[in-house]
Image: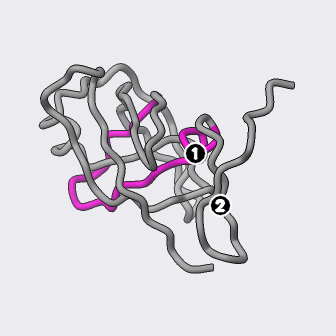
Amino acid sequence: MGLIHVTVTLKTHQKAKRKYQADFLIDTGATDCLAPTRALESAGISRRGKMNYELANGETVEYDFGLAEIEFMGELTSGRVIFGPNNTEPILGVIALESVGILVDPVKQTLKRVPAIPLK
């Protein structure tokens, strides 16, 4: 499957003047979003805690995370954003995707909206 990117905007709250906007890699293997630490700090996003994450190579690392509004494809959600290394590519994780009803179509290598988000 090819790589899918989408433009994402992160900010602390609706009326925040500072923000971080970039093309994020869609990663259905990642739970949370990840962005470069410097970019999150510039957007005013604060560290709220630490969490252990397992990398693709099996290594476990501890990263700080913050909470942010996450906007993409005309949709808005909020969630954890990991303070990643400054040279890292931003990642949009599966929780943000699913929370607004967007799924990855691996055949067409596109994102698609579900008609309704299940509550059951």
Amino acid on which the number 1 mark rests in the picture: Leu
Observer-nearest of 111 and 26: 111
Query: Which quarter of the figure is the C terminus placed in?
Result: top right
Residue depicted at x 52% and y 43%: 53
Observer-nearest of 97 and 49: 97
The label number, if any, that marks residue 104 in the structure image = 2
Residue 30 in the image, given as x and y percentages of width and height: 56, 51
State the image quarter where residue 63 is shown. top left
- The residue stretch that appears in magenta: 79-98
Residue 8 in the image, given as x and y percentages of width and height: 36, 49
For the residues labelled 2 and 1, say whether their Cβ atoms are less than 8 Å apart.
Answer: yes
Residue bearing mark 1? 97
Q: Residues within 10 Å of mark 1 (few under 14, many from 20)?
A: many
Q: Is residue 88 magenta?
A: yes
Residue 72 in the image, given as x and y percentages of width and height: 42, 46
Residue depicted at x 69% and y 66%: 105
Instruction: Left or right? Give the position of 52 relative to 44.
Output: right
Amino acid on which the number 2 mark rests in the picture: Val
Query: Which quarter of the figure is the N terminus placed in?
Result: bottom right
Instruction: Left or right? Give the position of 30 relative to 9.
Output: right
Label 1, secondary structure: give it. Answer: helix
Residue depicted at x 62% and y 56%: 29
